[in-house]
Image (spheres, rainbow, N blue to C red):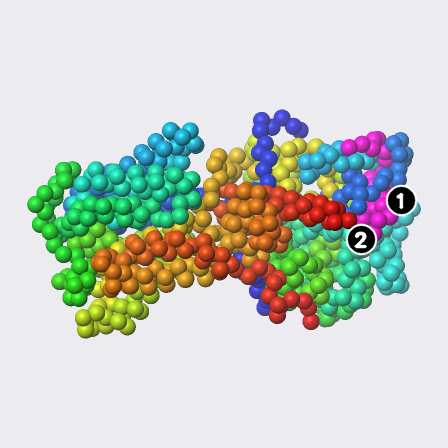
Amino acid sequence: MPFGFSGGIHPEESKDMTRGKPIETISAPEKVVLPVIMHIGEACAPIVKEGDTVDMGQMVAYSDAEISAPVHSPVSGKVQKIEDALYPSGSKVLSITIKNDFEDRLHSSIVRKKYSAMSQEEIIEHIRNAGIVGHGGATFPTHVKIRSALNKVDTVIINAAECEPYLTCDHRLLLERPGEVLRGIRILLKALNLKKAVIAVEANKEDAVKVLKEKIGEKKDIEICVLNTRFPQGAEKQLIYALTKREVPKGKLPVDAACVVFNVDTAAAVCRAFEIGIPDIIKTITVSGSAIANPKNLMVRIGTPVSDLIEAAGGFKQEPNRIIMGGPMMGVGQSSLDVPVIKATNGILAFCEKEDKISKNPTCIRCGRCVSVCPMGLMPIYMYMYQQKGMLDECRDMDVESCIECGCCAYECPGRLFLVQSFRTAKQLISEARLREAQRQN
Amino acid sequence: MSGFSRLTLAPSPHIKTEEDIRSIMTDVVIALMPALAIAVFTFGMRAFIVTAVSVLGCVFFEWGYRKVLKKPSSIGDLSAVVTGILLAYCLPVTIPLWVVIIGDFVAIVIVKQLFGGIGKNFMNPALLARAVLFSWPVMMATWAEPRTALPVFKTPVDVISTATPLSYLKGGNMPADSIMEMALGQTAGCIGEISAVALVAGGLYLLYRRVITLRIPLSFIGTVALLTFLFPKGGADNVQFMLCELLSGGLMLGAIFMATDYTTSPVTRKGQIIFGIGCGALTVFIRYFGSYPEGVSYAILIMNALVWPIDKYTRPRVFGTARHRIGGR
């Protein structure tokens, strides 16, 4: 049995609140807000106008750039406005607001597609047109990932680690819809022209492993691998290492280690795009945290305001101090509930004041805990010091660009330093400097 | 659905470990208490008073310095308390209280605060202060006979003095005390260094609480053990000599509580082992060939000065950079 990687942490799992709760579909929202970019790559341009009537599943924003993914409406209704709106990152992004007419009229493009009768190219094109992006949170367009992996990889890994505390949506997906996941994986295998995939699951999901194994039965195309429960076991590089003992070379991608990784919910979305024909308009999300009255796993349509999700989970039982989109380790803090669910949303967490551990004077005491937990073998203590002093060359030499921003270092830091923020800043400044240098040389 | 009074907007991660600087320092203080109990048993209440004065002096100087320079107060992290206790532990119980105060000033203001406060000192504050206090060599080497009455506040005069086990060893003889007496703390010596048992108990507590790892203490003590076992002085029995060296002087206190100080030790695994070995080797070297009977303080101070180069040359391997692991098939 493969194990893990060096470093990492064991935070409180905090999954008991929701791991036993089946996924609930919440009622459709009154309106949806669809940012034109919910993925890595080029933003889409709206292809509808204010006042247009749209159907459920209709494409509403598109870009013909290679690294992009179209946006579809998850409801039928009328386009109310197209303007900049608050995006979960805190900035404003052009968004299409659609008022739901609650008729759920399916668009004519929603048809079942038999993938076994399609060629590789057709499958990849269909995945592109369905706007499917990585559901693990990174939202890289799936069709691009497949294309870049063609004839270059020998190992397909399906990431069901879900190593972030609190989140249980992937776990529930495996328990409740294993068939959907497996069929989605088989479609991906056909697209890649490969014969085998391995689903990586953390040891805290033994029940899901059983269900999957039963569903796979005698077939040999999909294997299950159980990994030690540790954060960040689900991080791509660490996952690849745990399963294959290959390290993705510094600065490179999984394809350079002959591997390709897809999140388990991405596989489910791929299945739905063929079996039902619907594009990427649905997300499973865990709503949890000490401030939430009834933590739940929900199935929602993208574009739903986060306030609807909180309501569906019983609202706040205590005044929230922090609201997070994502997991507690790598999620993004929110300043408002008036943001939409996007393709990257896996969790909405709300915490109370007394859990907050912030210091008025973050101080480094050189304890070295950050160094011992870094899964990438970096030295946060010195990277932080160099970044604070503006010594970016030294910072780059300490390989800050290899930082995966998992947060293990800042989690352990007794001085409560904002380490991840420091490294994000350093990476940004270094890449800006590199760009300026490249422009100067031209 | 709005109407929150206040939301905290901060970068990830949004959960953190329970431990902070204050909880770590509290654990260290707890770990140092068994040694204090033995010290009071062996030397009387004066041992407690010297320690208490040292702690109050350190806290006062840190508070005062930060206030005068209009910096945020840092005494809440309890690191000044730890420094106060550790400094007291490296002094003889007969030390005049005003000398203790001077030591506190050197440790907190000069070694620590002038360099920027906690995390920024480049040498162990208690040890460097103790080195400065050797400017009063007689006071630093007046050893009281255990279990004799000593004035609690006034400076002792006409002390019934005695030789410490370490001074015997320096002279090439075996100490008059038995191994058991040295282990339990019924010998002469500095306040906190006499009982190996009490110090090891504190060390085990710190290991359990994950405040320290075994790397530095084990490599430090192990190196001293190995060298003194292989090269006993004065033709004594190897094991006997080794045990005497291990249980005398400030070795246990230094290896468990001083060399493991976060700020002045390396952050890398390999670096910590090199550091421990270096401390051990220098301790034996100074004890054998130096003019002081005690080598631990100076060994640690010398290794403190080497911490940054040690860190630089023992950088862990960055993921994705080992040549034989790159790529696929």
Q: Which residue is mark 2?
A: A272
In-image side of A74 versus B23 (left or right): right
Q: Which residue is mark 1?
A: A107
Residue B329 placement: quadrant: bottom right
Q: Which residues are magenta?
A: A55-84
Residues beneath discs 2 and 1 located on the same chain: yes
In-image side of B157 versus B262 (left or right): left
Of residues A5 and B284, the one nearer the viewer is B284
In-image side of B234 versus A175 (left or right): left
Q: Is residue A76 magenta?
A: yes
Q: Earlier in the sequence, mark 2 or mark 1?
A: 1
Q: Counting other residues with Cα less than 10 Å from the Cα at mark 2, is it few (<14), some (14-19), or many (20 or more)?
A: many
Image point (68%, 39%), residue name: A89
Q: Is residue A261 magenta?
A: no
Image point (28%, 36%), residue name: B56
Residue A100 in sight? no
In-image side of B327 versus B101 (left or right): right
**Which amino acid, by three-letter code, is at mark 1?**
His
Residue extending farthest to the front is: A441
Say if B250 sits above or below B242 in the image. Answer: above
- Residue B60 drawn at (x, y percent): 31, 34
Residue A332 placement: quadrant: top right
Residue B148 in sight? yes
Q: Tell me the subunit letter for badge 2.
A: A
Of residues B41 and A214, the one nearer the viewer is B41
- Residue A191 drawn at (x, y percent): 81, 62
**Which amino acid, by three-letter code, is at mark 2?**
Arg
Image point (79%, 67%), residue name: A151
Q: Tell me the subunit letter for badge 1.
A: A
